[in-house]
Amino acid sequence: MSETPHIDIDYVANLARLDMTDAEKAKLGTQLDDILGYFDKLNAVDVDGVEPMAHAHRVFNVWREGDQPGETYAPEVLTKMAPESRDNQVVVPKVVE
Amino acid sequence: MSDLHFKTISELAAMLAAGETTSVEITQAVIDRTAAVDAQVKAFLSTDAEDALAQAKASDERRAAGEALGPLDGIPIGIKDTLAVKDQPLRCASKMLENYVSPYDATCIVKLREAGAVIWGRLNMDEFAMGSSTENSAYQTTANPWNLETIPGGSSGGSAAAMAAGEAIATLGTDTGGSIRQPAALCGVVGMKPTYGLISRYGLVAFASSLDQVGPFARTVEDAAILMEAMLGKDDLDSTSIAPQGETNYAAALKEKKGPWKLGVPQEFFGEGIDPEVKANIEKAIDWYKSQGCEIVDISLPHSELAVPVYYIVATAEASSNLARFDGVRYSHRSEEAKDAMTLFTKSRGEGFGDEVKRRIILGTYVLSSGYYDAYYLRAQKVRRLILSDFEKAFEQVDAILTPTSPTPAFKRGERADDPLAMYLSDVYTISVNLAGLPAISVPSGFTKSGLPIGLQVIGKAFGEADMFAVANAFEKAHDYAQQTPTL
Amino acid sequence: MQYEAVIGLEIHVQIKTRTKMFTAAPYEYGAAPNTLTDAVVLGLPGTLPVLNHTAIEKCAKLGLMLGCEIAEVCKWDRKNYFYPDSPKNYQLTQNEEPLCIGGKVEIELPGPSRNVEGEHRWVALNRIHLEEDPGKLTHEAFETVIDFNRAGVPLAEIVTEPDMSSSAEAVAFLNCLRNMIVYAGISDCDMEKGQLRCDANVSLRPVGSDKLGTRTEMKNLNSISNVKAAIEYEIERQTEILEEGGSITQETRRWEVESGTSFSLRSKEEAHDYRYFPDPDLMPVQMDRARVAELEAELPERPLDKQRRYQEELGLPFTITSVLCVDRELSEFFEEALKTHNAPKQIANYITNDLLRELSAVSEHGESAHSVSQSKLTPAHIGTLAKIIDEGVISKQIGKEVFTEMFATGEMPDAIVEKKGLKQSNDTGEIEALCREAIAGNAKAVGQFKDGNEKALNALKGPVMKATKGKANPKMLDELLKKLIEEGE
Ligand SMILES: [Mg+2]
Ligand SMILES: [Zn+2]
C-alpha cells in the first residue's frame, strides 16, 4: 500500500450488515485511518517464502468417526430463544431474493 | 470463620478435608462479600446465590458421604460472561444477547463441575471480550478494587476485580491478546493463559478463534495450577484442542522444581512506552531471579513490535466472521425496525453491538474484503509465523521468558476511551504470546508509589506449563505481594 | 453471425450420511421442523464444528468415481455472507484447497432414436469440494419461516469446466452423473427432495472463437427439465441481445418455473464479496494414500463401462443394456443370475421384460415403488427358469406361466414345474398319435404346407398342444409333423 489506506465505510458496513449513523461512520473513519496507518509497519517486513500461520499447532485429521447420530434439541429450545416463532419454526420478515 | 473469601483453594481444600469449614460456609462468605462490595466494584453482571448454595450443599453431602472429588470440590468459582453455563444468562456483556440463556455447559464448566466446583455468577467484561479496560461492557463499568477511579484492565476485568475484592475464590477468564494476564496484573492477582489448545474452547463465545484461550485467575500460582489440571485435555467437541504433552501434575511439580533456570529477557519489551515504575519493578524482579542463581539471558524477539498490527488484523478478521451469527434471527437482539431481511440484519446488529465491537467488525471485514486480503490478512499470517519463529529460537536458549505484563499500571476510567490505538497498545507485551500459542502467567510483582499493582509475566514454552508455574511460584513464594488485599 | 453456447454446471449433491457435516445431529428428509438440530446446527454462541470423517471418505469416493485427483491435503474455508437460513452467516466450505481436483465424466448424448445408441464424449470437471447445506426457508404471504433441519447436511459441490455446448449435453451430463453417484452409494440424487441441485453458467461466443463470452449464472434449477428449459431460454435470450448489437451483463438469474422465464437477481457490481479465509476452528485433512487406494478398490464399475462390456462381451443389444445398466441393483441381479445359468440374452430378456413389467404392475397397484430387492425373486429364480427352458424341461410358453407363479409366491421354478406337472412331454408315442390325428383332420393345412407355406404347420401344432396342455416339446413336434407329412406322400 503506497497510498494511505482509507476504508470505504459504506461498502464495508454493508458487507458487515451494520447500520451506523453518519456521525458514527465519520468518527470511525478517522479512527480506522489511524489504525490502518499503524498497520503499514507490516509492509516493511520481508515475508517472501514464509508459510502463513493459520493454526498454532500443525495438526491434521481431527474428525469424528462412525457417523453415529447424537442427541438433538427439542424444537422448543430454539423457539424459546427466538425473537419470533410459529409452529416450531423461526419467523423473520419476508425474505425476497 | 473470618475472611474465608480471601483464602486460597489449597487452604480451603485443607480446611474442608479437616472438617473445619463447609462449602456452604465458604460459598455463603463469598455471597456475603459480594453483597457487601459489589456495589462499588461492579464485577458481577448477575449472580444466582440460590443455585450456588445448592451446588455447595451437594458438595458438602458428597464429602459427608466420603466421596469428595479433590481440591476444587466445594470451591466457588466465578465465570466470565463469555463462557456458557447451562441455564444461566450468557450475554458477553452485550445488548446483543440481553435475553439469551445458554442451553448447554462449556467444556471447561463441565470439567469444573466434575471436579466438584461451585459455579458462581456471571462476571463483567468488555463486550465480546473486545477491550482492555472493561469499559466496553453494555451493562456496567467495573472498578479496580485497588483504586475505584481506575480501570481493572480487560477484557476479563470482572474476573480480575472479583478476585482482588474477594468475591470469589477463583475465577475464569478468557485471553485472546492478554485479556487474563493484563487485568490480573492491574488487579494484583495471578492470571494465566495456557498453551493454545490445552483447554477446550467449546462453549467459549468466539472472539478470535485462533487466539482465544480459557484460563484461571487465582490468588496463587499453585491455585492456578490446580484449576489448570482440572480443565485441560483434548475435547472431541473442539478440533483445535490438543492432548497435553509432558508434565501435567502442575501443582505437585511446582513444589519440586526449584531451578535455577535460564531466563530470557527480551530487550524489545523495555523500550518506548513503558512506565518507569513498571520498568524498575520488573528489573528488580529479574534481579531477584539472578540472586537465586538463575542465568539471565538477553534475548531478542525482533518481530515483537509487529505483534500489535498482526494481532489487530488476525483478531478482527476472525471476529468479523465469528460475530456474524448475531443477526437477530435465532437468539440475539432483533430490532423493532426490522422490515425485511436486510434491515433485520443491519438494524439488529447496529442496535445490538457497542462502538468497539462495531469498530473491530468493520476493521476485520475490511481486511478480508476483496482486494485487501493479501495485503492485510495473508501478510499478517506470514508475519505471525515470524513472531512464532522468534520465540522458538529464544526457547532454544532459555527455560522461560520474563517481561512486564502491562506497560502501565491501571489507568483512569475514560482516559483512553476515545483513542482506540492507545488502548490497543496496552496489550503490547501480551499479544505476541497469543499469536505464538504459548502459555504465560502474570504474578503480582509489587505496587506503584500510588499503590497500584504491577505484574510480572512469565512466558513458557509450548506445553511448558509445569516449568512456567515453577518459575512464577518461586518468585511468588519469596514475596508477599499476592497476600495483600485492597481496602474496600 | 453464428453463436455457440458455452455451458458449465455447478451441482450440489447431498452426501448420504446419517449425521451432519460438522456435528452428530442426524438428518433425514421430511422430519418435523427443527427436530434435527443441536447447539452446533443452530450456531449457538460458543459452538464449534467437528468434521464428519464418513462424509470426507464418501466425497473422496465420489471424486474417484468421477476421475478426480484426490488432494494430498485439503483445507476448510469460511465463505462469509448473510442469509437467514445460514446459522453462522458463513458457510464452511473448501475454497483454496478442495478435496477433489479435476476429473471427467463420460456422457452419452441422445441417439437418433430411442433404440439407437448416441454419441459418447467426456465432460471435464474443475473440482469437487465439501461444504454444508443451509436451513430451509418457506416464504409465506408476509413472513418467512425457517426450519434448520437441513442446516449442516454434507454437500459435495461438483464444478464442471465450461465444457458443454447445448442443453442436451447438460441433460446428458446430469443423467450420467446421477447414475454414477447413485451407483457409488454417495447419494440418492432425488431432485425433488433437494438431494441434487443444479446451477448453470451460460455464455455465448461466435462459432470458431476460443474466447469465452460474458456469462450469466442461473439458479434454482431443481429438475432436469428445468435445467433444459432454463439453458435453452438463456441461449435464446443472449442470442437475441447479441444479434441486436447489445452486450451481456454478468449477473445471477433466477429461473421461474411458472412463467418459463428467468429474471436478474443481482449484477456483478452487487456481487458478493465473500471474504473467504481459512477456518480457524477446523484442522486440515491429510488424505492417506493407502486409504485412497482402498476406496478406489471399493468403487463399482461405472455404468457406461458396464454397458460397453455387456454389449461387447455378452453380445447384448444396446436397448437392453441401457435398461439394465441404469440401475446398479438390476445389473447386479443380472450378473448374479448368470452364475446359475450363463445365458445372457435369455436372462437379460427375462429381467428387462418380464421382471420389470411385473414390478411396475405392483407399483401401479398402489404399493410404493417396487424394486428388485423388494420382490420375492432372487437371481437364482431367473437363472433356474432360463436353465430349465434351455434344457427343454419346459417350453417358453409354460415359462411365462411359471414366471407369474414364482413372482407371486417366491417358489423356485423347478418346484413349480414339479408341483403343477408342467414338465414338457417327450413321449413320442402319444404325440405321434395326436399328430396323425391332426394331419388327418386338416387336409387344407397339409396341402398348404406342401405348397411351401411353413406357417401352415402351426394349424396342425395347435390341436396337439391343446391336447397335451402345452407340454409337448415344440421342436420335437415340428420335426415329427414334417416327418409324418413326408411319409404320407
Ligand atoms: Mg458455487
Ligand atoms: Zn456451494
Image (cartoon, rainbow, N blue to C red):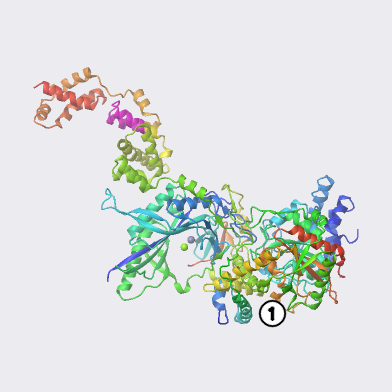
* Residue C398 painted magenta: yes
Q: Is residue B336 visible?
A: no
Taking the spot 65% from the left edge, 68% from the top edge, the residue there is B387
Mark 1 Cβ inside 8 Å of ligand 2:
no
Query: Which x, y percent locates residue A83?
Result: 61, 64
- Look at mark 1 in the image and give the residue it sits on: B419
Chain to which mark 1 belongs: B
Q: Is residue C329 above or below residue C250?
A: above
Query: Which x, y percent locates residue A17?
Result: 57, 71
Amino acid type assigned to the residue bearing label 1 in the image: Asp
Q: Which residues are magenta?
A: C382-404
The quadrant of the image that shows the C terminus of chain C is: top left
Taking the spot 56% from the left edge, 48% from the top edge, the residue there is A67
Total numbered badges shown on the rendered structure: 1
> Secondary structure of the magenta portion, mostly?
helix
Query: Which x, y percent locates residue B357?
Result: 65, 72
Taking the spot 71% from the left edge, 56% from the top edge, the residue there is B108
Q: Is residue C354 visible?
A: yes
C162 and C294: which is toward the camera: C294
B237 and B25: which is toward the camera: B237
Left or right placement of residue B17 versus residue C133 in this view: right
* Residue B89 painted magenta: no
Query: Which x, y percent locates residue C457?
Result: 16, 29
Q: Secondary structure at mark 1?
A: loop
Taking the spot 62% from the left edge, 82% from the top edge, the residue there is A30
Q: Residue furthest toward the top?
A: C429
Quadrant in the rendering for residue C204? bottom left
